[in-house]
Amino acid sequence: MRLGDAPESSNFEDRTGQSGGGMSLGGGAMGLIFSLVASRFGIVGIIILALGYCALTSLGGGGILGGGGGSSSGESKLTPEQRQVLTGVLGSTEQVWSQIFQQAGARYTPTKLIAYTDYNQSGCGAAQAAMGPFYCPTDQSIYIDPNFFHELSRRFQAPGDFAQAYVVAHEVGHHIQNLEGTLDKAQSAQARAGTVGGNQIQVGVELQADCYAGVWANRSGLLEAGDIEEGMRAAEAIGDDMLTKGQVSPDNFTHGTSEQRMNALRTGLQSGQPSACNFAG
Ligand SMILES: [Zn+2]
């Protein structure tokens, strides 16, 4: 990617040098969490995400971590490359989505992107690195532990700056869905549906976010040769069937199969049109 050409976003917050991050807040609002990956730690994480809720709020309340809003060493744990991907991709999504919203006669309110390590307090409760990157609709913020990029590169064998950009743009896609009211609608539909139906609804939401990531990429003007392949490799690697290696029934999939995710990303990439991303029903 030509990230040097990307506008740097001012909606980025680096909390990677902090520990605790305000764990004493405790409790907190329950919010829908749409994580990019099902889980790195097997079935427990999958159940948490299958419920579609942030289920980690009980960690707060001044537990073993004490309280006081976290301590800050001031030392960022972000590499310059990671910072450039995060701020540049976020800035570029702001440019692209502002334009799309403007053309539709609306105004785009940007999401915040918060980089953290280990754990942090989000509007949806405690954020843990193990959850993978996620978007919290309550505070309209994306939370990402940059170590996930290592994971993507090593464990999921999807290296490259565009693979990372896809992760960020996918979460921005959830923010778009929040602004459009799609997340609210999905949440009420999930409440009426059974588990299987609820999972299907979430898969639709996730695929639309993948497609929106492709729409951004199409319009970003930042792509170089090889970028699309990087993105496809990432989309393939984090498909539910790949992640769970056949140990989970397709009824329990929440993000779509590798094939579905690649198809969704490709649809956005090729069309550049949000209206082509009609996956969320
Ligand atoms: Zn997602």
Image: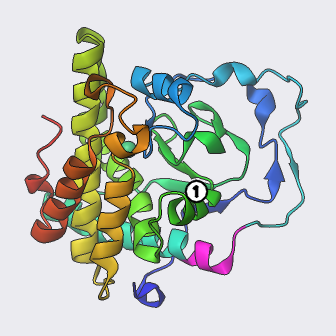
Kindly tell me whether residue 48 is visible in this rendering.
yes
Kindly tell me whether residue 31 is visible in this rendering.
no
Tell me which corner region of the image, top left, top right, bottom left or bottom right, holds residue 272.
bottom left
The range drawn in magenta is 78-84
Identify the residue at horizontal 14%, vertical 51% (top origin): 277
Tell me which corner region of the image, top left, top right, bottom left or bottom right, holds residue 49.
top left
Q: Residues within 10 Å of mark 1 (few under 14, many from 20)?
A: some
Identify the residue at horizontal 42%, vertical 20% (top origin): 51
Amino acid on which disc 1 is placed: Phe
Identify the residue at horizontal 81%, vertical 41% (top origin): 20
Query: How many marks are shown on the rendered structure?
Result: 1
Disc 1, SS: helix
User: In the shown orientation, is residue 37 left or right of residue 250?
Assistant: right
* Chief SS of the magenta region: helix
Front residue (pair 216, 81): 81
Q: Position of residue 99 (x, y in %)?
A: 23, 69
User: In the shown orientation, is residue 153 left or right of residue 70?
Assistant: left
Q: Position of residue 227 (x, y in %)?
A: 33, 79
Q: Which quarter of the image is occupied by the C terminus?
A: top left
Identify the residue at horizontal 57%, vertical 58% (top origin): 151
Q: Position of residue 228 (x, y in %)?
A: 28, 75
Check the image and report above or below for 189 versus 269.
above
User: In the shown orientation, is residue 262 left or right of residue 45?
Assistant: left
Residue under label 1: 148
Q: Is residue 280 magenta?
A: no
